[in-house]
Amino acid sequence: MNLNTTISDLYQQVRRREISPVEITRECLRRIDAVNPSLNAFITVMADSALDEAKAAEAEIAAGNWRGPLHGIPISLKDLIDTAGVRTTAASALYKDRVPEEDAAVVQRLRAAGTIIIGKTNLHEFAYGGSSLISYFGDIHNPWNHARITGGSSGGAAAAVVSGMGYASIGTDTAGSVREPASLCGCVGLKPTYGRVPSRGVIPLSASLDHVGPLANSVTDAAIVLQTIAGYDAADITAFDIPIADYVSALKVDAKTLCVGIPRSYFFDDLDAEVASAIEHALNTIRSLVAETKEIQLNIPTDRSLQAAESFAFHAENINKNPDLYHPETLRRIRSGEKVTGAEYIARRRELDQSRRNICSTFADVDVLVTPTTPIPAPAIADLKANPDALRPAELTLLRNTRPFNVWGLPAISIPCGFTQAGLPIGLQIAGPPWREDLVLRLAYAYEQASTGHT
């Protein structure tokens, strides 16, 4: 079996019964046994239940009951997404033995689609960081160079996808935690519009900024997964009842009608030279694919007190009872929200709502925006560990270009657009108007088909 096969290739073979979900799942489990010891991408491997699910999928498909493109396909979940009867740890000693009674909403949808849940991936503790170097279960290593970080907080999800230990993963993104590791590890990472995918049953970092989205090996695969997990959830107060497009069909719509905005100020500042070169090359390709590109200016939100306050509010009780069960740096970050007053929180929340309304006017002139995903490639683990004071500044640099789109709540994707001379991936970010994941995916797919950056 070709480990590099995408979901879009594989599901047709499954449907025609040319390959069995049991074969696929066993191959992924063999890959996990071989590769995970060096990458540390998984916290929990659900081998027995995954094989049981694969056997059930095989029987259903044989009986003519094919549920859709994820039926019998193994994927993983970031380990702050609840799974009934299987521990969900958030990579923290505090939750190392926590076993939920109910699946998160996204897991319920995946199971209804016949997806095989192969395991729970490692992450930056409580998703509060962009390096994945702070985890009760140890560091996560980049598949392209084990001495480099994966980014975070969905570092294990990205590493699992890129190294063939599953065909997609579900991550979360509060400041870039899907797109940044996708960029540093060389896969596709999609953050949908805020409220497009339910977050019920996901351990929060910041309820106003948290997004749930897929990491995958192709734009088509990301669209397939999004199609399954998107949609209104009446039990989720962050969810919106907005119609969903046919994301997979939208990929084939010609990008020639699109006008692309390029916000150079801020997003293109202080880029690594090789990142800058790869992005300019990608922009040249995009110019050949679309109707027009134009440079624009954006007002960038930079305040982080809302996230800090919401994170502290969630953790306050446990911090008072068990502060020693948090990594000291995680504890410091959470406590940074302790002094945010109620009045300040209300003011920041109003600013967020206003910012989300204001950004819509940008799309009167352009259809989508294009930026680098991260200003630099993946840093070395040893360098960050040798100088702990450099860790947070490095993470903030890596998340600089992704964070504004969480504040705005816009759909945004990172796709591979090249490599450094040292063989480290570089990512291109495409964002669009609220609820227009179809536009973002359309340009991402057109670029992916026209370029060799993803190879």
Image: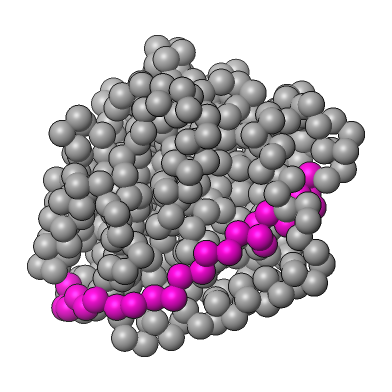
**Residue at the image point whose x is 51% and y is 83% from the top:** 358
Q: Quadrant of residue 12?
A: top left
Report the side of 170 relative to 430 (left or right).
Answer: right
Q: Is residue 437 above or below residue 210?
A: below
| Whether residue 417 is situated above or below residue 122 in the rendered picture | below
* Percent of width and height locating residue 134: 58, 29
Q: Is residue 283 left or right of residue 136?
A: left
Residue at 68 percent across and 77 percent down: it is: 350
Picture layout, residue 42 above or below residue 425? above
Q: Locate residue 4 relative to residue 114 in the image: left or right.
A: left
Coordinates of residue 65 in the picture (x, y in percent): 50, 43
In which quadrant of the rendered view does residue 355 lie?
Answer: bottom right
Stretch of the chain drawn in magenta: 290-315
Confirm whether the magenta stretch covers residue 308.
yes
* Residue visible at 44% across and 41% down in the picture: 394
Instruction: Please name the residue shown 52% across and 29% down the image.
Output: 388
**Residue 338 versus residue 361: which sits nearer the camera?**
338
Q: Please state the horizontal and vertical placement of residue 48, each as a whole percent of the image.
A: 60, 18
